[in-house]
Image (spheres, rainbow, N blue to C red):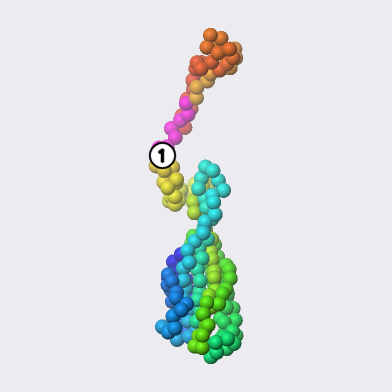
Amino acid sequence: MRLTPLIKHMRNQCPAFARRVFGALDWDPTKEVSKADMPAAYVVVLGDDADPSPSQNVIQQVIRDTFDVCVEVSSQDERGQSAADALHDLRAELWRALVGFEPGDDGDPLQYDSSELMLINRSKAVYRFRFYTEFQLGRNTPKPGEAMPPAETWHEQVLDGLPLLQGVDTDFDFIDPLVDRNLSPTGPDGRIEFSTREDLQP
């Protein structure tokens, strides 16, 4: 998942953060000094999970991309009472900005997953809000008249590299009455009695 369009969208749609939305591949909840004024949000990519392919002749997997929005708010006490209301309002703002938003052309609209307290001390509280999107790995067969989309998997690359099917050769070994009793008591006896070819290319 690309962070840049997601962060740009959040900066425009979440005014409570005053554009203090940042991206990261990791966030350390033990750090004591915030690098930004609060409230601030850190978008952290968590990774993805894949379902097994339901088909045997093609590979098509549903992939779930997950990310956290770690929100830092000021807190005047270790219990976090002063931060609770702020987090409640910020969560509603995140829902309005992210749930249903499509961060790219290859995924479903974002959905909300869960939340969790990560850090609380006398200066700040950090709460993470988890979101995800799903998409399919492996292309669909195009409709008539549409071009084949680019390969997404090795299996598709192998199929794309095969030559066009020129025709079909068929050999017939009759069961009866042309069976040779010297070769087999019943047909087929292993001899080809008739061959055909069907040309598929003009």
- Where residue 193 appears, as percent x and y from the top left, is 51, 15
Within the image, what quadrant is residue 94 found in?
A: bottom right
Q: Nearer the viewer, residue 144 or 139?
A: 139
- Where residue 155 appears, as percent x and y from the top left, is 45, 45
Q: In which quadrant of the rendered image does the C terminus lie? A: top left
What residue is drawn where x is 44% and y is 46%?
156
Span of residues in magenta: 162-169
What secondary structure is marked by label 1? loop
Q: Compared to 108, does 94 lie above or below?
A: below
What residue is drawn where x is 42% and y is 70%?
25
Q: Is residue 130 visible?
A: yes
Horizontal placement of 132 versus 165: left or right? right
Q: Nearer the viewer, residue 189 or 195?
A: 189
What residue is drawn where x is 50% and y is 68%?
67
What residue is drawn where x is 59% and y is 14%?
186
- Where residue 81 appears, as percent x and y from the top left, is 59, 87
Question: According to the image, label 1 marks what residue?
Answer: 162
